[in-house]
Amino acid sequence: MNMGNDENIVATVAPSPLKKVTGASKRAAARIINELCTGCGICVKTCPLNCIRIVESELNFTGIAEVDERCTGCNICAIDCPWTGVEMINPDGSRKDEAEYERQLKKLRGYH
Ligand code: SF4
Ligand code: SF4
């Protein structure tokens, strides 16, 4: 399914291997799995900080998502991405357990 369009593309970057998240933050940060991202733009619309944009990529015609340094690690984009194209990376470089997103989702919706 291709839900993106050229109007969403705001910049050009070369595809690059996954980068390790760095910085002093104690929270995880979102990282796009370039090979899974379809450039649909859903995460761009749902990120509360507007810190995701779609950039051109050789991987697909619609581009791919890119997260900037303002990410607070809220997990919303990782929860919302229909293609599991976002992973949350802890400050130590490990991958955050997806079960934590589920707990957060339930909490946000008032289930516990
Ligand atoms: S990361 Fe997921 S939600 Fe965001 S543009 Fe890529 S496929 Fe769509
Ligand atoms: S984790 Fe939250 S703040 Fe970070 S890019 Fe995703 S939606 Fe935006």
Image (tube, rainbow, N blue to C red):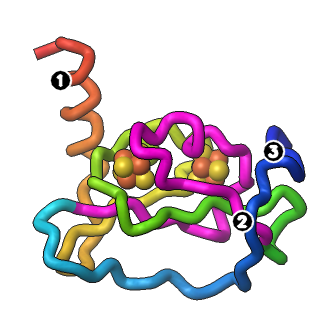
Query: Which structural element holds mark 1?
Result: helix
Closer to the observer: label 2 or label 1?
Answer: 2
Q: Report if residue 41 lies within the magenta region.
A: yes
Residue 51 in percent (x, y) is at: 47, 54
The residues bearing labels 2 and 1 have C-alpha atoms spaced at a distance of 32 Å
Q: Is mark 2 within 8 Å of ligand 1?
A: no
The residues bearing labels 3 and 2 have C-alpha atoms spaced at a distance of 11 Å
Q: 36 or 74: which is nearer to us?
A: 74
Residue 35 in percent (x, y) is at: 66, 69
Task: Report which residue position mark 3 lands on.
Answer: 4
Query: Which structural element holds mark 2?
Result: strand
Residue 111 in percent (x, y) is at: 18, 13
- Quick one: label 1 or label 3, which is nearer the N terminus? 3
Which three-letter amino acid code belongs to the residue tagged 1? Lys
Task: Report which residue position mark 1 lands on.
Answer: 107
Labels 2 & 1 near each other (Cβ < 8 A)? no
Which three-letter amino acid code belongs to the residue tagged 2? Val
